[in-house]
Image (tube, coloured by chain):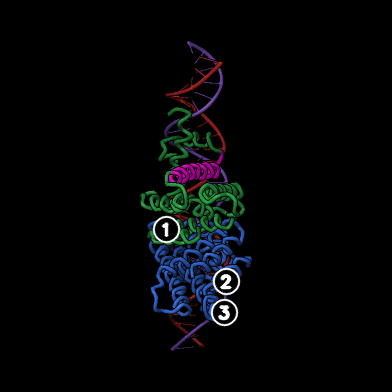
Chain colours: A green, B blue, C purple, D red
Amino acid sequence: MKHSEVKDKIIDTASELFYRKGYNSTGINEIIAEAGIAKATLYNHFKSKDEICIAYLQSMNSTFLRDIAAFCRGREKGKEQILAIFDFLQEFYQTSVFNGCWCIKTVAEVPKDNEGIRGEIKRQKNLFIQVIADLIGENLGTEEQHTSKVRQIYLLYEGAVSESHLHQADWPIAEAKRICEAVI
Amino acid sequence: MKHSEVKDKIIDTASELFYRKGYNSTGINEIIAEAGIAKATLYNHFKSKDEICIAYLQSMNSTFLRDIAAFCRGREKGKEQILAIFDFLQEFYQTSVFNGCWCIKTVAEVPKDNEGIRGEIKRQKNLFIQVIADLIGENLGTEEQHTSKVRQIYLLYEGAVSESHLHQADWPIAEAKRICEAVI
DNA sequence: CAAAAAACAGACAAGTCTGTCTATTTTTGA
DNA sequence: TCAAAAATAGACAGACTTGTCTGTTTTTTG
């Protein structure tokens, strides 16, 4: 395999396994077997399993932020673009890969003192909040103070992700969207 | 130690460790060391670690449901009793033991096919939804159809738990309460 | 084309884990 | 009181884990 492809292959394979099976339940040996590479190769690209975890989180997050922003901006201007984040979630929920929030899942699995991973997760959540803030600013005007609204929508989205996953039902997404309509 | 006390001691010790450190990060050896009992004693009371996990979840949940119901019913009748669930959460958040939702944490750690643990968690969430439904029925009248309202408040509560834990801040609790006021 | 870099397979260290078992002592209850 | 039950300590099996290291082969690049 070409050198430039190997790192991406590792991240893609690890991401699929971490997200589906969990971080601690996925071993290094499983990653290399699935990716079809040697163990020394993996440790040539990453110093530790934790480092792969951070690459996994970043990979998931950058895809997510790009996709949800594009999805919402594809809707007509105004409140529709904000409500669209729940339609995006509904579509994600329908796919076979949906398995809840990778951040919440990972936070639950790593010790409290793991600042590398926990810091990355906080950073991601703040980036997502910023994406919502941008959507609000573009569609509801920038004059007002929207901090509270942004946080509320963020809260609704996150609750909908967790609960639709836990109950394996999509009513949390529908209810979150309904509350969001009332909020904005 | 008396026979009748041993089982409770195991559950209490395991609960504290599971909730604080996580299920997979807490070993059997740690539980027995902390509880001051022999390994064979533990396996005399529980068939497996998973069985201790279920006892842990049940212990946490029964305490929680009892306390939150009592807390809310201590408030004056009406909407106050419903909003009180967020005050209850705020008080819980302030304590040093708060560490997010034990159900969400545990779900993230056990494989998808573990039906014993995952079934117990679903059961608990439905019991909590029923507690909210009772509060709504008592304080907003039973005539109307409150299914949607109950689910919305549940969603807000769960979101507030997760996000206050993740961000280590209490704004998610305050925002959830504000949305709840608008909903009811 | 040759040298450097990175791939490969896989053994190995050192540690973790759950659960079983033996053998002895303490507690309990009829 | 005395037998049954349950406690004790701790060795052990067997299977996992991450990460290192050796030695060989392939790929890349100046």
Question: Which residue, given by chain and number where applicable, does mark 2 sit on?
Answer: B88
Q: Chain of mark 1?
A: A
Residue A65 % position (x, y): 49, 44
Residue A101 % position (x, y): 47, 53
Q: CA distance from mark 2 to mark 3?
A: 11 Å
Looking at the rendering, the stretch of residues picked out in magenta corresponds to A47-73
Q: Please state which amino acid type lies under the numbered disc 1.
A: Ile
Q: Nearer the viewer, residue B171 or D15?
A: B171
Q: Are marks 1 and 2 on the same chain?
A: no
* Residue A118 sits above or below residue B134 on the image: above
* Residue A122 sits above or below residue B100 on the image: above
- Local crowd at mark 2 within 10 Å, few (<14), some, or many (≥20)? some
Q: Is B11 positioned to the left or the right of A30 in the image?
A: right
Q: Which mark is residue A173?
A: 1
Q: Please state which amino acid type lies under the numbered disc 2.
A: Phe
* Residue B101 sits above or below residue D26 on the image: below
- Local crowd at mark 3 within 10 Å, few (<14), some, or many (≥20)? some
Q: CA distance from mark 3 to mark 1?
A: 31 Å
Q: For mark 2, give the secondary structure.
A: helix
Question: Which residue, given by chain and number where applicable, does mark 3 sit on?
Answer: B75
Q: For mark 3, give the secondary structure.
A: loop
